Amino acid sequence: MLERSEKTFYCTLTRFLPLVLVASLAACNPFAPELDDAVTDPNKLLGDRKTVNGFFEWWRNSYQLRDSTLYGQIVAPDFRFTYFDFTNNTEVSWPRDVEMNTTYKLFRGVRATSLQWNQYILADTAISDTVAIAERAFNLTINQDDATIYRGVGSARVVLTRKTRQDNWKMRSWYDKSDF
């Protein structure tokens, strides 16, 4: 026969056992994914900027995600953006700080952006290991809200630079030829 202290122990145990089971099940949720301890290589996710194709993938992904910090990683310190203003029949250009500010405001002011790179019009990577020129056609869609959607096509002629073959490409200049 159980003594009084043993009865109290078993009685207390049977009261708290369901709580212990629920707590242990909560810590082991079969519907929750496990944490992945492996470090994810951003080059595999966003594009390997050591290649020209990877550079354009990174650019596309920075627009898709509307992330100016990602975009800023491909823009060189001495960057220059240029386009032709048909209304005034003149070229307009601006430096990196204006480009980054403009892109930041674009990304924050719209609901979604979609950049699709198409064929290469020009791809000259034989100049050297540290300079490449590429012109590539693109489609850009900007969803400001449900009622306002802008679509444009064109091409971007970019000069890419890097210090050594092991470094990532950065955009030194972008000449925009689009219908925006």
Image (cartoon, rainbow, N blue to C red):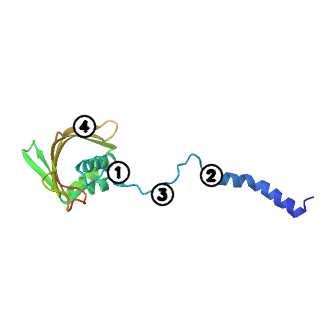
Q: Tag 2 or tag 1, which sits nearer the N-term?
A: 2
Q: Tag 3 or tag 2, which sits nearer the N-term?
A: 2
Q: What residue is rendered at 89% in x and 62% in y?
A: 4
Q: Nearer the viewer, mark 4 or mark 1?
A: 1
The three-letter code of the residue at mark 3 reads Asp
Specify the farthest residue to the left.
89
Q: Are marks 1 and 2 in contact (CB under 8 Å)?
A: no
Residue 154 location, quadrant: top left
Q: Which residue is mark 3?
A: 37
Alpha carbon distance from label 4 to label 3: 41 Å
Circle 4: is it few (<14), some (14-19), or many (20+) Cα within 10 Å? few
Residue 98 location, quadrant: bottom left
Q: Secondary structure at mark 1?
A: helix
Q: Which mark is residue 26?
A: 2
Tell me the quarter of the image containing the N terminus: bottom right
Q: Secondary structure at mark 4?
A: strand
Q: Which residue is mark 1?
A: 44
Q: Nearer the viewer, mark 1 or mark 2?
A: 1
Q: What residue is rendered at 59% in x and 47% in y?
A: 30
Q: Are marks 4 and 3 in contact (CB under 8 Å)?
A: no
Q: Which mark is residue 151?
A: 4
Query: Picture coordinates of residue 123 (x, y %)?
Result: 16, 46
Query: Picture coordinates of residue 95 (x, y %)?
Result: 17, 57
Q: Are marks 3 and 1 in contact (CB under 8 Å)?
A: no
